[in-house]
Amino acid sequence: MMAPLGFAPLFYGYFLESFSAKVMVRWALLTLGLLELVFAMTDSYLLLLAIRGVQGFMIPAILTSLISYISYTSTREKVQHAIATYIAATIAGGFLGRFLSAFFTDLFGWRFFFFLLGMLLLLTSFLLRNMARDVKMAYARPKFSEIALLLRKKEFFWLYSSIFCLFFVFSALMNFLPFQLKQMNPESGESGIGLLYLGYAMGVIVCLNSRAIIRFFKNEPDAIRAGVLIFILGTLLFMFEYYVVMFLGMFVFCTGLFMAHSLLSGFVNKLAEENKAIANGLYMSSYYLGGTLGSVIPGVVYVYGGWQMFLCSLLLMLLTASIFIRNLKKAVASLEAYAGDREL
């Protein structure tokens, strides 16, 4: 059901080039909230799947609208930090969604949290009527040739390839870790699994300090590569099949992923001087396509090769991402050198 998230952002990028981000995000939130209420009340598994499919098209409308809204209302100097703050908010939501759903499932069953979530989404749609400023992203509809032109630029190609690999790994581990925890301790409750995701908190800290991280490493590509190395270390820690080690490993794992993700998402807005909505749409498509395949393909390795082989396959993907980021640095350096020559 994550598959629509991999394709929809690109098309919502099209819409955002001509329509209001404020209107789109409010209607998408309203629809998503209503669907959550239906989700909480149904007894049909097929209807649950159908609702998830429709929600897959609603969520990109919200995320792409918000990130484009932020990028267009922020100055070039502040856009990196503004996007990082946005990512911090999504991380906080990611943790609370996983932890509270597990906690409330133990207390009240699985329906309660979805009903609560639906009500909160409806409330959010209502509150966003007070957005201080509305934005129409541009005045012309982009064409597929413009997308192809963007992808032919090496800096964007390597950036999108990197985030594909990174979220592939993140999605894989997050989806299959609960199964491994159940194998390690069949009597563990949902709350114990949910508590493991407390490592998400590191993502908030990292994102809110993104500018300091960039200053420390002198440039974005080196900072991103450092995030990937931390991501690799976190993945290695999951090879020790003890709950306490995995609990601590989640902090390292999330630090690496969100450090790289927050910097990459801000960097794409810094590189894209025009058609920001399309650039953001392609970023999100790469992100969620990685997540979609990461939710399925590594599962085959996990079933037939076990947990250790599963982690080795993820490490191979992270090494590939590291190579892509090295190529990104070279492409950006060439771009800056060319711009310097033109000024001379």
Image: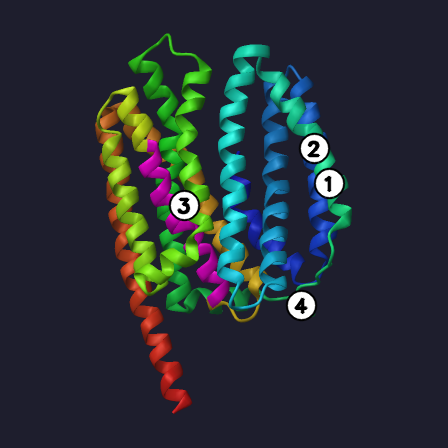
Considering the image in quadrants, where does the C terminus appear?
bottom left
* Residue holding disc 4: 138
Mark 1 and mark 4 residues within 8 Å of each other at the beta carbon: no
Give the structural element (helix, strand or loop) at label 4: loop
- Decide: few, some or many residues near mark 3? Use Cα within 10 Å; few <14, some 14-19, many ≥20: many
Label drawn at residue 125: 1
The Cα atoms of the two marked residues, 1 and 4, are separated by: 24 Å
From this viewpoint, is residue 148 visible?
A: no
Q: Is residue 258 magenta?
A: yes
The Cα atoms of the two marked residues, 1 and 2, are separated by: 9 Å
The Cα atoms of the two marked residues, 1 and 3, are separated by: 27 Å
The Cα atoms of the two marked residues, 3 and 4, are separated by: 30 Å
Q: Quadrant of residue 97?
A: top right
* Residue holding disc 3: 258
Q: Residue sitting at 54 percent across and 23 percent down? A: 100
Judged from this view, the residue extending furthest toward the bottom is 344
Which residue occupies the foreground of this view, 223 or 58?
A: 223
Mark 1 and mark 2 residues within 8 Å of each other at the beta carbon: yes
- Amino acid type, label 1: Ser
- Which badge, 1 or 2, is on the more N-terminal residue? 2
The Cα atoms of the two marked residues, 3 and 2, are separated by: 27 Å
* Residue holding disc 2: 33
